[in-house]
Image (spheres, rainbow, N blue to C red):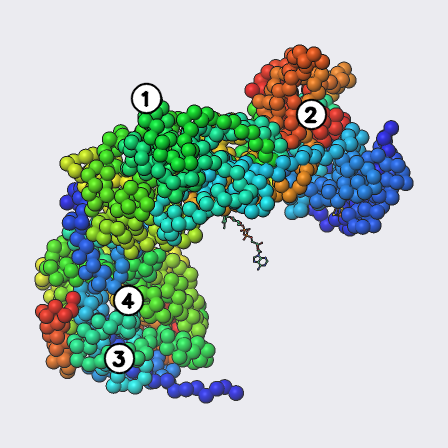
């Protein structure tokens, strides 16, 4: 038999004006199981809380209902009071007779009756309440950062500076990502390399950062605070510990004509190479597909010339297991290429632009390499076909982006700004050249961004023409651009020397595979989904995993860095405690009844439900049941409502508790 | 020409003309971002074939023939609404003045001869009399424009109310006024003034 | 002095199943704004509409509710990301079942009320109260109640059908 | 104790229209100023300011004509009072432009063979009445309050534009006319077309334009319940008053809306004899309205 205490609050006049609080208390006292009922002027005040604490002791109460304001207001207060009185805090409930009653009704009788009903419902519920203990999980204070672009580097540095260990995993031989490829950056036009390279070096030298380049995530196990990551370190064919980065191997390698992907294939590199001179680490990789040794078994020049003996043709991929407590995903983006349709790209293609067959039609990143002082032309704008300096350059915005029918509807967000930047860089380098831009809108909602774009037009004299380009075709050594100026309604034709397409920012090919390994969700384009667009923009729905940079959606550097620092801050918040404590409102499976239909698994938005094998003592598999990982469960209860065998229950909202309330109607 | 394709290149964009208009009007043309606010409020928009914003746009692209070909510039009432409201401080009313001057100097190719004629007569009046005499202005305009009967009904009404002076007298300082015209002509001849 | 209040012969009982994050907060807001509505509603709070089992609705009708309101976050705003989508699908199937067993669907109302929509909460609660008042007391289920004891098992073909309809 | 009232005296540039089609504007201005005890001395041998046609096609000429007028005004004491909105605008624009354009100023100075007078304050009558004289004093001077008369104040294009030049009042939402006429007891209506263009000098070359634009102005004033319009510009007056009959014929709408110069109404209120205010030269006869309101 339970002993429930009911405390009816007057809230000064707020409740007492319309609700006859004494009557409510008196009626509550008659409810079965109620051992004590009273009313008081201000329950939340110190004397009010003391009244509650004393009553617990005096009347040996095992459950409490405070009939007062909304639980959103004072549930914490009264649960804490109950706790200090030695009661499990989850045995204290609030009956909302203020917001839901005294404030919204005028008739005193009706309001009093309703208040009594609400109290009765809560009394019925509290009788079914169970003692709940906050869940605690230990935290491994080590973070994994996936992707070594500016996002990953920033997040890694922030976390490492806070004193935590970071494992930074980068797929390519060097960290740096796209930012390392850029020339100068909007909106300030500072040199990308100049601001990026020091950060890359900092990351590599930081005592708290373990760098795995040329590596990928093999698998992810565990949950928030306790992940086990398996990293595949791909065979570099160069022993990192021995290599001094002298570069003799690259210089002597007879295979010299391999297109350099970092330079968007404008230049070439040897088979043993670092992607770019400032690469971090400065350790070469053998591109086995193009290496003579690996193709024919002959050559071995690099091994012969390498002083420290760092070349190892036998090296194999290695798997490393890293325990971490939190993960930052920062895998960045890819540009849509009209040349080759990237696998999985939803964009239907640009036949009207020649499908990439016109050599002097390039993308924005290629232009960055042309404009970069450390690029293949030493920063001279020269067109790929014949190396001449182009005098008429046409830029075309929104190629792929914002074109529902082509396959994607979103705006790539950065191309308006980088195209404006390109026209400026071009004008700075080719004074007698003319830049034209075909655009639909100039989307420049950033600090100093519109001013930047206006500068391109007003000071650098770029001619902006509103309208999409219909077609491009080669005519002699020119490219005819067919457009239209929609402001004046006249067709426009320009014979260009070079055409630069601002192609769509897309998620990395394979972003979905990584997401599946991590158990995080992604949108229909494969950008990773944040838990809440506004209030949890860096958290994944999966606890303990955070997002930074362009992998979550198109982003420029300022946005990327802000998000990266925010993700790092979230990781640090997590690491501030030794154990994670959370409300024990989580689902539990009754393994006896579970029929393993796994409906629960299907509906759980948090991916908290796993399959669990039940084995006998000999280790024989008896059956499979569902298991809810309490570290991951968000507590929505969807599984419970969906379970056909009623085998899963959400603590704090059990069927019993709810039914009790309904019965009390 | 109105609908023919614009072939843009550094050769076909007459930026010298644009610079001249910018110098005459003291207003930047590039600053315009084609919001259309000028045209939205222009009281004369419905009489123009190119709304004011399009005039600026053609200028941005150096398409001066297209600007001067239309009668739009002659239908601008100089009300300054566009200039007042332009978010970019494009002084369109001044640009219209500059364009009319360019067209005036080129003796065409404007289509709006009536407006031009009225302006010419008005200025002639100043040179001859120092002040405006509306009676003469109207009469000569009607004769020259071949609209003999235009406003026939208004004339007597105005005269009886003393609103049109039938006789007029010259300013006493006519010589000085003539000097002003002469000196301006002289400066222009020497290329010292636009 | 309050305006003269009408006396109704029949005061229906309305049970509202609401989620904590949106509708419960919306109803709180109606309170803070001192908006007035009929006193017929009794609120049962859930973490999420995804937690609301159709059985609860049946039970409420059996236990004397004349009308039931189910309300949560707007689609896409769910605190738990997708709970309300599951709820929406589940209730779509459930309505068919209720119809089948002869419950007038006008007694059951689904709606989305956000934490900012105190006014909408008042509207929804008032409308349902008025509508059910006009319909008169719900009798169909009360008789059943004496015969059947609630259990978690799926022991009727209707329930089976309802669960099978869950995608 | 009332502060000593200073004696105001101005040099006066009437402009071509006030000597012809707008003679009632001139007469009433002189009458009003006399009644208020404000001195007014006409600049001798002033010439046409060039108005719209000059700057339309020849900015340099326009600037030179105005500069010449400014230097003529130098000989007459007092700030330069201007009645016509177009003259006012041109004179102000000239000072404004030449103050910050050295090249143009040199050209103009050569053309007029003298320095440009950038210092002489050029003031519209409204400014003189509202700011120099003062609305309180204006109210004190009232002998026949215009109470009951519903006036639609029409600013036209040029009184406040272009921005930063006349600085008479707010460029887009001025109230100076309403304040001035309100000071003598008239009621002013809120209406939409206070600053729409009336068709300006197209009156000669393209009267169709005027019929359309002035038509909608009359329409709007009528819809707002105005008894009459009040203007401060002869060109506006010409279009709205002289062409009103034609507009009525073209639109089939009857307005019968007298169009007053602001000085006519003000002078009437401060007791100038109606016979001296040129009411008889108005095309739309205002006397029935004035009689109805007991003002004549
Ligand atoms: C042409 C062009 C010009 C630009 N100009 C500017 C500018 O002027 N100013 C500006 O602010 N922004 C500019 N940007 C945008 C800028 O490039 C991005 O904002 C920024 O690079 C995003 O950084 P990130 O770290 O999120 O992604 P990325 O730079 O793409 O880095 C992601 C990193 O993750 C690695 N990675 C990917 N997948 C995996 C995996 N599965 N495992 C391990 N590692 C992985 C990649 O190799 C890469 O190193 C420009 C972009 C383009 C295309
Ligand atoms: C019309 C409109 C619609 C919008 N709609 C959306 C939308 O749909 N979606 C969206 O994502 N964003 C929207 N936004 C943007 C959103 O409102 C802002 O991004 C957000 O409010 C910024 O939050 P804040 O905390 O930075 O600033 P604020 O909300 O301005 O908060 C600043 C706080 O600081 C206080 N404060 C100021 N100075 C001091 C001081 N000296 N000392 C102490 N306190 C001080 C202020 O009182 C205030 O409480 C909208 C904005 C507007 C104007
Ligand atoms: S507990 Fe709530 S209802 Fe009671 S006095 Fe405090 S605020 Fe008011
Ligand atoms: S073995 Fe391969 S990498 Fe080494 S030098 Fe030869 S081709 Fe180059
Ligand atoms: S940022 Fe600009 S160019 Fe890029 S997709 Fe958006 S609108 Fe188009
Ligand atoms: S100011 Fe606002 S509406 Fe205008 S472009 Fe920027 S974000 Fe868009
Ligand atoms: S839905 Fe229920 S029965 Fe099915 S797997 Fe989950 S807990 Fe087990
Ligand atoms: S309560 Fe919600 S989050 Fe937790 S396991 Fe069930 S469905 Fe998943
Ligand atoms: S208002 Fe100004 S910016 Fe807008 S279109 Fe006209 S001139 Fe251009
Ligand atoms: S000044 Fe000319 S172009 Fe500008 S709004 Fe007036 S009439 Fe139109």
Closest to the observer, D42 or C81: C81
Label 4: how many residues lie within 10 Å, few (<14), some (14-19) or many (20+)? many
Labels 4 and 1 positioned on one and the same chain: no
Q: Position of residue C112 (x, y in %)?
A: 58, 34
Labels 3 and 4 positioned on one and the same chain: yes
**Marks 2 and 3 in Cβ contact (< 8 Å):** no
Q: Specify the label residue D237 is tagged with.
A: 4
Judging by the rendered image, the residue that carries numbered circle 1 is A296
Q: Is residue C58 left or right of residue D120?
A: right
Q: Chain of mark 1?
A: A
Image vertical order of residue B177 relative to residue A121, above or below: below
The residue tagged with tag 2: helix, strand or loop?
strand
Image vertical order of residue D30 relative to residue B96, above or below: below
Q: Specify the label residue D117 is tagged with.
A: 3
Which is in the foreground here, disc 1 or disc 2?
1
Q: Specify the label residue A588 is tagged with.
A: 2
Q: Quadrant of residue B114?
A: bottom left
Q: Position of residue A187 (x, y in %)?
A: 38, 51
Q: Specify the label residue A322 is tagged with.
A: none
The residue tagged with tag 3: helix, strand or loop?
loop
């Amino acid at each position: 038999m339970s002993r429930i205490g009911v405390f009816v609050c007057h809230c000064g006049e707020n409740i007492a004006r319309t609700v006859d609080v004494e009557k409510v208390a008196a009626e509550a006292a008659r409810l079965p199981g109620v051992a004590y009922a009273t009313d008081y002027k201000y329950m939340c005040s110190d004397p009010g809380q003391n009244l509650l604490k004393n009553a617990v002791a005096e009347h040996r109460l095992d459950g409490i209902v405070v009939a007062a304001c909304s639980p959103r207001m004072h549930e914490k207060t009264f649960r804490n009071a109950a706790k200090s009185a030695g009661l499990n805090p989850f045995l204290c409930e609030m009956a909302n007779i203020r917001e839901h009653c005294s404030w919204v009704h005028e008739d005193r009788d009706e309001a009093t009756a309703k208040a009594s009903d609400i109290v009765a419902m809560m009394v019925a519920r509290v009788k079914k309440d169970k003692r709940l203990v906050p869940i605690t999980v230990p935290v491994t204070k080590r973070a994994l950062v996936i992707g070594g672009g500016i996002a990953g580097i920033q997040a890694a540095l922030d976390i490492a500076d806070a004193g935590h260990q970071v494992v930074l995993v980068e797929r390519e031989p060097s960290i740096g990502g796209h930012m390392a490829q850029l020339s100068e950056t909007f909106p300030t036009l500072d040199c990308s390399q100049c601001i990026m390279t020091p950060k890359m070096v900092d990351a590599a030298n930081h005592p708290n950062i373990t760098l795995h380049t040329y590596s990928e995530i093999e698998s992810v196990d565990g949950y928030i605070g306790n992940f086990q990551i398996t990293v595949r370190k791909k065979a570099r064919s160069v022993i990192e510990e021995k290599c001094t980065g002298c570069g003799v191997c690259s210089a002597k390698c007879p295979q010299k004509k391999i297109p350099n992907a970092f330079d968007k294939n404008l230049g070439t590199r040897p088979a043993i190479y670092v992607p770019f001179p400032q690469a971090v680490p400065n350790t070469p990789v053998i591109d086995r597909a193009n290496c003579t040794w690996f193709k024919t078994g002959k050559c071995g020049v690099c091994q012969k010339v390498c002083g420290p003996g760092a070349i190892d043709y036998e090296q194999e991929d290695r798997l490393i297991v890293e325990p971490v407590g939190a993960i930052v995903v920062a895998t960045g983006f890819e540009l849509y290429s009209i040349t080759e349709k990237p696998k999985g790209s939803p964009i239907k293609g640009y036949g009207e632009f020649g499908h990439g067959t016109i050599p002097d039609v390039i993308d924005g990143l290629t232009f960055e390499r042309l404009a970069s002082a450390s690029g293949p032309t030493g920063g001279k704008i020269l067109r790929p076909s014949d190396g001449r300096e182009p005098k008429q350059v046409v830029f075309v915005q929104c190629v792929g982006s914002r074109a529902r029918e082509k396959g994607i509807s979103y705006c790539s967000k950065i191309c308006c700004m980088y195209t404006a930047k390109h026209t400026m860089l071009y004008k700075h380098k080719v004074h007698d050249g003319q830049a034209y831009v075909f655009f639909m809108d100039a989307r420049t909602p950033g600090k100093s961004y519109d001013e930047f774009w206006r500068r391109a037009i007003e000071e650098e004299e770029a001619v902006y023409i509103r309208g999409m380009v219909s077609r491009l075709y080669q005519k002699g050594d020119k490219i005819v651009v067919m457009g239209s100026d929609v402001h004046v309604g006249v067709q426009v034709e320009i014979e260009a020397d070079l055409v630069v397409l601002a192609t769509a920012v897309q998620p990395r090919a394979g972003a979905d595979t990584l997401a599946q390994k991590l158990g995080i969700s992604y949108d229909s384009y494969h950008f990773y989904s944040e838990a809440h667009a506004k209030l949890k923009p860096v958290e994944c729905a999966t606890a303990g995993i955070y997002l930074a940079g362009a992998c979550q959606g198109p982003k420029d550097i300022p946005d990327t860095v802000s998000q990266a620092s925010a993700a790092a801050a979230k990781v640090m918040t997590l690491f501030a405690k030794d154990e994670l404590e959370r409300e024990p409102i989580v689902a539990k499976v009754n393994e006896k009844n579970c029929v393993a239909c796994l409906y629960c698994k299907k509906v759980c938005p948090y991916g908290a439900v796993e399959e669990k094998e039940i084995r006998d003592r000999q280790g024989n598999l008896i059956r499979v049941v569902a298991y809810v990982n309490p570290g991951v469960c968000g507590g929505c209860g969807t599984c419970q409502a969906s379970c056909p065998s009623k085998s899963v229950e959400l603590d704090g909202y059990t069927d019993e508790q709810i039914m009790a309330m309904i019965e009390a109607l | 020409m109105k609908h023919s394709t614009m072939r843009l290149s550094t050769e076909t964009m007459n930026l010298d003309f644009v610079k001249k208009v910018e110098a005459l009007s003291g207003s930047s043309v590039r600053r315009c971002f084609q919001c259309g606010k000028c045209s939205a409020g222009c009281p004369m928009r419905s009489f123009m074939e190119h709304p004011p914003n399009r005039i600026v746009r053609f200028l941005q692209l150096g398409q001066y023939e297209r600007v001067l070909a239309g009668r739009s510039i002659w239908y601008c009432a100089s009300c300054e609404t566009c200039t007042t409201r332009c978010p970019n401080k494009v002084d369109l009313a001044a640009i219209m003045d500059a364009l009319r001057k360019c067209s005036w100097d080129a003796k065409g190719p404007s289509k709006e001869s009536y407006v031009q004629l009225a302006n010419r007569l008005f200025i002639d009046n100043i040179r001859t009399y120092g002040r405006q005499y509306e009676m003469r202005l109207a009469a000569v305009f009607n004769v020259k424009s071949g609209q003999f009967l235009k406003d026939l009904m208004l004339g007597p009404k105005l005269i009886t109310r003393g609103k049109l002076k039938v006789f007029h007298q010259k300013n006493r300082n006519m010589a000085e006024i003539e000097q002003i015209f002469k000196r301006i002509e002289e400066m222009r001849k020497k290329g010292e003034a636009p | 002095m309050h305006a003269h209040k009408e006396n109704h012969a029949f005061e229906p009982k309305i049970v509202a199943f609401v989620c904590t994050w949106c509708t419960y907060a919306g109803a709180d807001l109606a309170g803070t704004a001192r908006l007035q509505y009929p006193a017929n509603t009794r609120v049962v709070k859930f973490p999420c509409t995804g937690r609301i089992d159709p059985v609860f609705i049946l039970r409420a009708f059996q236990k004397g509710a004349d009308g039931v309101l189910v309300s949560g976050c707007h689609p896409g705003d769910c605190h738990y990301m997708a709970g309300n989508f599951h709820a929406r699908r589940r209730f779509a199937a459930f309505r068919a079942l209720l119809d089948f067993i002869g419950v007038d669907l006008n007694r059951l109302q689904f709606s989305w009320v956000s934490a900012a929509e105190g006014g909408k909460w008042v509207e929804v609660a008032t409308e349902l109260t008025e509508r059910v008042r006009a319909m008169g007391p719900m009798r169909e289920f009360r008789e059943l109640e004496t015969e059947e004891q609630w259990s978690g098992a799926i022991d009727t073909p209707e329930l089976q059908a309802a669960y099978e309809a869950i995608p | 104790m009332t502060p000593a009232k200073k004696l105001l005296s101005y040099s006066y540039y009437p402009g071509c229209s006030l000597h012809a089609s707008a003679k009632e504007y001139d007469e009433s201005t002189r009458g009003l100023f006399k009644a208020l005890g404000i001195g007014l001395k006409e600049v001798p041998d002033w010439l046409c300011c060039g108005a719209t046609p000059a700057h339309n096609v020849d900015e340099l000429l326009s600037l030179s004509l105005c500069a010449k007028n400014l230097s003529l005004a130098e000989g007459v004491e007092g700030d330069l009072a201007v009645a016509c909105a177009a003259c006012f605008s041109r004179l102000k624009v000239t000072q404004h432009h030449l103050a910050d354009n050295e090249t143009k100023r040199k050209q103009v100075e050569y053309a007029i063979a003298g320095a440009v007078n950038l210092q002489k304050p050029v003031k519209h009558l409204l400014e003189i009445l509202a700011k120099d004289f003062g609305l309180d004093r204006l109210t004190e001077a009232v002998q026949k309050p215009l109470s009951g008369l519903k006036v639609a104040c029409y600013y036209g294009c040029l009184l406040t534009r272009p921005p930063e030049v006349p600085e008479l009042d707010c460029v887009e939402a001025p109230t100076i006319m309403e304040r001035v006429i309100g000071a003598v007891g008239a009621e002013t209506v809120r209406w939409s077309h206070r600053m729409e263009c009336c068709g300006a000098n197209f009156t000669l070359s393209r009267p169709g334009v005027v019929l359309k634009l002035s038509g909608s102005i009359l329409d709007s004033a009528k819809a707002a319940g105005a008894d009459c319009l009040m203007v401060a510009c002869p060109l506006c007056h010409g279009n709205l008053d002289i062409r009103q009959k034609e507009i009525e014929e073209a639109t089939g709408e009857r307005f019968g809306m007298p169009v007053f110069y602001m000085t006519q109404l003000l002078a009437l209120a401060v007791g100038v004899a109606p016979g001296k205010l040129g009411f008889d030269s108005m095309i739309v006869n205002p006397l029935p309205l004035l009689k109805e309101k007991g003002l004549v």
